[in-house]
Image (cartoon, rainbow, N blue to C red):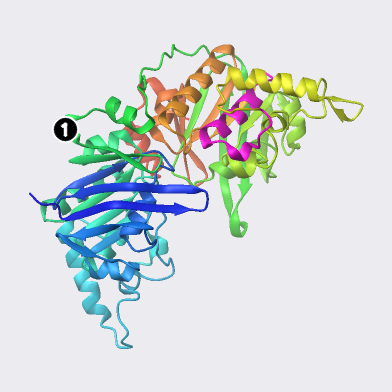
């Protein structure tokens, strides 16, 4: 059987980064082909070349055995290649129909009724039902994704590229997407599925190609591999998936949030009456699709945003609207959601980043002068303890990989043995090895007696690490449950704003 699509020797270099190096890839008709790799492995770059967003520096693309040149997305679409990006390319103020036909015709006379009828028929045929007259702004994230897929189908796509399509979906929406993909491929569509999630690869693909650091490692039949093998291919070494985690022994309440109201954009409330408590010796996981008030809630708890109404206590002390410095002095530590913008000063040395929160205190400062010997001694110890891969503590933090940058923040947070740790997306963009290290470190801190509030959009991470799980939706806490008995279906309903029949007690 000859491949439908072949990439040969694809190479792409950006200033200082070799994103793709001599990549060969074959895609067959009617399959879901997973493109697996950690963030930065080169998956999206490769597919952006196929879709005409980037030009390759070297290599060729063959469609049905014939070499093709793709200089723009329009040319890709004309060849039957469509792409749904991780961040949707929709205009919220327009209707579904208007978004789908946008840019397709130069005529001033549009038959909107005929277009809407075709869209409705295609939606029913492929299980992508959506109201063609609805404004995109009124649709859920899952429905917006359907619009993007319909847009590609309406334009004649036979090869559909999906870039991290489940990143913003609830578990139920993810299952619905997988059902849609199976229906599409059963009718001759070919799907290239970009992901870094092993469970999704195993659930929906027929073959999987693994990229690591811009190179193709291997292509295998999904039925002939395992998550353990794929993880090893992704990071270049074997990963132990077993996490030794004994039951928590919660102590006194360390963080208490009562009826918190926090403003968001356009004077609307981003957080609406949230109440929760985190005890010493437990990990409280806060699950939810990004953009449901998590960022505002954490900024308020860490003193970075003012609270309109409600109270925050740490170790029984009122701390509402206190500055971050006071909270740090009370024993709080914070892993921010964006390590490069909020957690590090990239141009500064590793050793300087490791004392950012303590540079004015002994033994790092004396009579307003930094003490280089003490700083270097601490840095060398933390680099060893946290396995920060660097030739020296004096190189800029920006020179390190994302995983090692995150370890700098983790080391800085845990150096003072905090009573409360706020960890926001602590493993976002990290490889499986770095993720496993951070998970084990969080559990060790819990066992030491630290109270941990973990915020993550990765449900697998929440379930793996947490002792209790809360779900946030549109700024409201929908429910709290013990992780040991947590049901993914129930969590998914709460993430979508729907209460199950047996409501979860808060």
Between 4 and 205, which is closer to the camera in this rendering? 4
Give SS at disc 1: helix
Across and down, in percent, residue 286 comes to: 49, 33
Q: Is the residue 377 above or below the residue 87 in the image?
A: above
Instruction: Identify the residue at the far right of this view.
Output: 367
Q: Residue at x 16, y 32 (%)?
A: 223
Across and down, in percent, residue 340 comes to: 60, 42
Q: Is the residue 339 above or below the residue 88 in the image?
A: above
Q: Which span is picked out in magenta?
A: 393-417
Instruction: Identify the residue at the far left of this view.
Output: 1
Q: Which residue is mark 1?
A: 223
- In the rendered image, residue 80 lying in the magenta stretch gets the answer no
Q: Residue at x 25, y 82 (%)?
A: 111
Query: Which quadrant of the structure image shows residue 347?
Result: top right
Count neighbours of disc 1 (C-alpha within 10 A) and say few if under 14, some if 14 to 19, many if 20 or more.
few
- In the rendered image, residue 395 lying in the magenta stretch gets the answer yes
Tell whether 423 sits left or right of 172.
right
Q: Residue at x 63, y 26 (%)?
A: 255
Between 224 and 264, which is closer to the camera in this rendering? 224
Name the main secondary structure of what is drawn in magenta.
helix
Q: Is residue 237 visible?
A: yes
Query: Which quadrant of the structure image shows residue 253?
Result: top right
Across and down, in percent, residue 396 comes to: 66, 37
Between 146 and 397, which is closer to the camera in this rendering? 397
Tell whether 446 sits left or right of 23.
right
Q: Is residue 315 visible?
A: no
């Amino acid at each position: 059987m000859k491949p439908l699509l072949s990439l040969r020797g694809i190479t792409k270099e950006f200033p200082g980064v070799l994103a793709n190096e001599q990549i060969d890839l074959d895609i067959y008709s009617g399959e879901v082909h997973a493109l697996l790799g950690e963030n930065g492995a080169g998956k999206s770059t490769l597919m952006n070349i196929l879709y005409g967003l980037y030009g390759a520096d070297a290599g060729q693309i063959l469609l049905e055995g014939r070499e093709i040149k793709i200089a723009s997305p329009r040319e890709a679409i004309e060849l039957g290649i469509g792409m749904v990006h991780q961040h949707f390319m929709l205009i919220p103020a327009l209707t579904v129909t208007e978004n789908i036909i946008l840019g397709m015709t130069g005529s001033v006379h549009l038959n909107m009724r005929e277009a809407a009828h075709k869209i409705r028929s295609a939606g029913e045929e492929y299980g992508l039902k959506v109201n063609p007259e609805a404004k995109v702004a009124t649709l859920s994230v899952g429905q917006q994704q359907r619009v993007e897929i319909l847009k590609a189908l309406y334009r004649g796509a036979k090869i559909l590229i999906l870039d991290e399509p489940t990143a913003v979906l609830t578990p139920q929406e993810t299952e619905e997407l997988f059902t849609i993909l199976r229906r599409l491929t059963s009718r001759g569509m070919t799907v290239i599925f970009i992901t870094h999630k092993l469970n999704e690869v195993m659930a929906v693909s027929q073959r999987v190609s693994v990229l690591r650091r811009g190179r193709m490692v291997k292509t295998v039949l999904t039925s002939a591999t395992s998550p353990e093998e794929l993880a090893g291919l992704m990071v270049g070494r074997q990963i132990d998936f077993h996490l030794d985690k004994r039951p928590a022994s919660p102590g006194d309440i360390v963080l208490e949030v009562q009826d918190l109201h926090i403003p968001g954009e356009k004077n609307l409330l981003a957080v609406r009456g949230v109440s929760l408590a985190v005890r010493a010796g437990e990990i409280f996981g806060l699950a939810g699709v990004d953009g449901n008030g998590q960022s505002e809630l954490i900024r308020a708890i860490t003193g970075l945003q003012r609270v309109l109404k409600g109270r925050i206590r740490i170790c029984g002390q009122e701390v509402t609207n206190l500055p971050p410095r006071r909270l740090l002095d009370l024993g709080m530590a914070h892993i921010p959601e964006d390590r490069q913008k909020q957690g590090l000063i990239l141009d500064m040395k590793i050793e300087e980043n490791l004392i950012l929160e303590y540079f004015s205190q002994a033994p790092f400062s004396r009579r307003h002068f930094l003490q280089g010997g003490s700083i270097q001694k601490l840095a060398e110890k933390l680099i060893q303890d946290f396995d920060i891969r660097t030739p020296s503590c004096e190189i800029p933090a920006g020179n390190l990989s994302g995983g090692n940058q995150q370890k700098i923040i983790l080391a800085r947070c845990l150096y003072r043995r905090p009573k409360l740790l706020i960890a926001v997306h602590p493993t976002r963009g990290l490889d499986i090895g770095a993720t496993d290290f951070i998970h084990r470190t969080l559990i060790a801190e819990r066992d030491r007696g630290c109270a941990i509030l973990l915020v993550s959009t990765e449900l697998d991470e929440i379930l793996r690490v947490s002792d209790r799980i809360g779900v946030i939706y549109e700024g409201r806490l929908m429910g709290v449950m013990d992780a040991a008995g947590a049901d993914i279906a129930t969590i998914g309903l709460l993430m979508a704003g729907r209460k199950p029949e047996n409501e979860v007690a808060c």
